[in-house]
Image (spheres, rainbow, N blue to C red):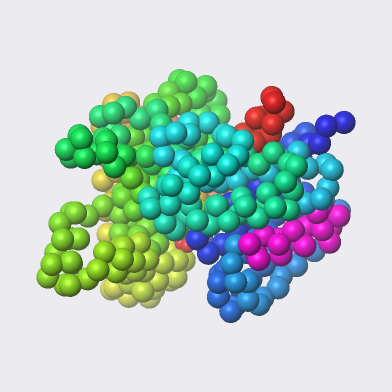
């Protein structure tokens, strides 16, 4: 029998999330996470899901993504699920920036690696980690197909009117400056799952997807195709995020350089790592921010209000882009868990047919669900994302075809 298992690696700037799935029934055999890579207190959390083993956790320095992946491989081996298994069909990798070249999942070869490397300047937090993950996995299993699934792929359907910045065309083309968009695997999965929740085909519905994690982005999905998204050349544009500013007047950068004397790298770090919620109030975790808000903390309240204001602007903008909206879907860590964020983002939008039912919004569940009142013109939904399952499905489909 041909092998049916797929290992998915989602390498972030300082973390690796992974899942081992059996594609016969999409069941998960093991899931885990390595956090704080590069620090003294790195943490590995591994949960075997077949055979009912207990979660194992360990803390200690894991210097880089190569060491992280080797540690993951060792954990999997303890459950008899090692990377040497003949049941493994492929390894699927989340790759954040694929530029314009990659519109589909792609089997990784030297040319693909070179292109992912060339794109590092426009995804400095993500592509280097993705590359190390791929190189380490290839060294461990050189015989196995390794597939890249790109965050940018779902957004390649955006019309030029949404994808181009209004800057000199020749300069834009020379430096390939355009809006690529990210979190596409999640936007694709969630827009489809939302249509399913409504009992309709993806081609029949228009959905605004709000992916609110540490990184956050919105997208306008018309009949299953992305027509606009809030992230741009890099994952810095758009919504207020955990540590990233999102939209700002580009002249802020000249001002910081000319008046503040900051270097380009310093400004990059400021906007990507010391802005957003953490820059506004010192915390980037929405749980902590809500706790402070509930205690009357004014700084946390202002950070929350700025976050919500930006989110509301994008809901309005994408409503206008789509003309008709069937659903607004909240997803990722904040979108799935933070009821106050959903309530505040939709508040006051009744004229657009949008409302949230307080009781439904308070329900905690891992299932896709509606939170709008019965009979509402536009559905508001919470739809948990599953980037790993989507990456596994795309990886397996590609390998099974070849
Ligand atoms: N119960 C919760 N209530 C509010 N926010 C939460 C909760 N759980 C997680 N979050 C938020 O979700 C964020 C992580 O989201 P996630 O989608 O996992 O992000 P990423 O994939 O970018 O690491 C946390 O930083 C936190 O702000
Ligand atoms: C592209 C991006 O922002 O990803 P993440 O949310 O995983 O940081
Ligand atoms: Mg994420």
Residue at 18 percent of width and 66 percent of height: 257
Q: What percent of the width, then of the height, locates residue 201?
A: 52, 22
Residue at 31 percent of width and 49 percent of height: 238
310 on left or right of 98: left
Question: Foreground residue, 231 or 341?
Answer: 231
Which quarter of the figure has residue 242? bottom left
Dominant secondary structure of the residues highlighted in magenta in the image: helix
Give the magenta range. Answer: 66-82
Q: What percent of the width, then of the height, locates residue 216?
A: 40, 51
Q: What percent of the width, then of the height, locates residue 9?
A: 63, 50
For the N terminus, give its image quadrant. top right
Which quarter of the figure has residue 341? bottom left
Does residue 65 sit above or below 113 in this rendering? below
Residue 233 lies in the magenta-colored region: no
Which quarter of the figure has residue 48? bottom right
Does residue 388 sit above or below 259 in this rendering? above
Is residue 197 at least partly visible in the picture? no
Furthest residue to the left? 259
Question: Foreground residue, 274 or 103?
Answer: 103
262 on left or right of 10: left
Residue 71 lies in the magenta-colored region: yes
The total number of labels drawn is 0
Question: Foreground residue, 267 or 32?
Answer: 267
Is residue 92 at least partly visible in the picture? yes
Residue at 20 percent of width and 34 percent of height: 169
Q: What percent of the width, then of the height, locates residue 328?
A: 41, 38
80 on left or right of 346: right
């Amino acid at each position: 029998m041909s092998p049916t298992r797929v290992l998915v690696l989602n390498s972030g700037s300082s973390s690796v999330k992974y899942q081992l799935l059996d594609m016969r029934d999409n069941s998960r055999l093991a899931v885990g996470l390595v956090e704080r890579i590069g620090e003294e207190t790195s943490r590995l959390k591994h949960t075997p899901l077949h055979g009912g083993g207990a979660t194992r956790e360990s803390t200690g320095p894991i210097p880089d993504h190569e060491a992280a992946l080797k540690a993951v491989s060792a954990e999997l081996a303890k459950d008899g699920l090692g990377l040497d298994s003949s049941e493994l069909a492929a390894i699927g990798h989340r790759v954040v920036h694929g530029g314009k070249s990659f519109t589909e999942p792609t089997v990784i070869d030297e040319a693909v690696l070179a292109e992912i490397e060339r794109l590092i300047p426009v995804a400095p937090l993500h592509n280097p980690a993705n590359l190390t993950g791929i190189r380490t996995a290839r060294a461990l299993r050189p015989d196995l197909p390794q597939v890249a699934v790109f965050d940018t792929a779902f957004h390649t359907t955006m019309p030029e009117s949404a994808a181009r910045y209004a800057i000199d065309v020749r300069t834009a083309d020379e430096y390939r400056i355009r809006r690529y968009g990210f979190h596409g695997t999640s936007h694709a999965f969630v827009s489809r799952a939302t249509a399913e929740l409504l009992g309709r085909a993806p081609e029949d519905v228009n959905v605004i997807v709000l992916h609110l994690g540490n990184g956050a982005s919105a997208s306008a999905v018309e009949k299953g195709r992305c027509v606009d998204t809030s992230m741009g050349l890099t994952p810095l544009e758009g919504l207020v995020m955990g540590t990233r500013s999102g939209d700002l007047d580009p002249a802020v950068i000249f001002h910081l350089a000319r008046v503040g004397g900051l270097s380009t790298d310093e400004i990059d770090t400021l906007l990507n790592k010391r802005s957003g919620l953490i820059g506004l109030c010192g915390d980037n975790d929405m749980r902590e921010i809500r706790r402070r808000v509930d205690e009357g903390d004014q700084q946390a309240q202002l950070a929350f209000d700025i976050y919500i204001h930006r989110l509301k602007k994008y809901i309005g903008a994408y409503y206008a882009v789509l003309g008709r909206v069937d659903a607004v879907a909240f997803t990722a860590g904040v979108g799935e868990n933070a009821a106050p964020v959903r309530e505040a983002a939709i508040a006051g939008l009744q004229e657009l047919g949008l409302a949230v039912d307080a009781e439904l919004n308070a329900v905690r569940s891992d299932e896709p669900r509606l939170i709008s009142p019965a009979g509402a013109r536009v559905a508001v939904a919470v739809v948990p994302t599953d980037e790993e399952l989507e990456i596994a499905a795309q990886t397996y489909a590609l390998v099974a075809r070849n």
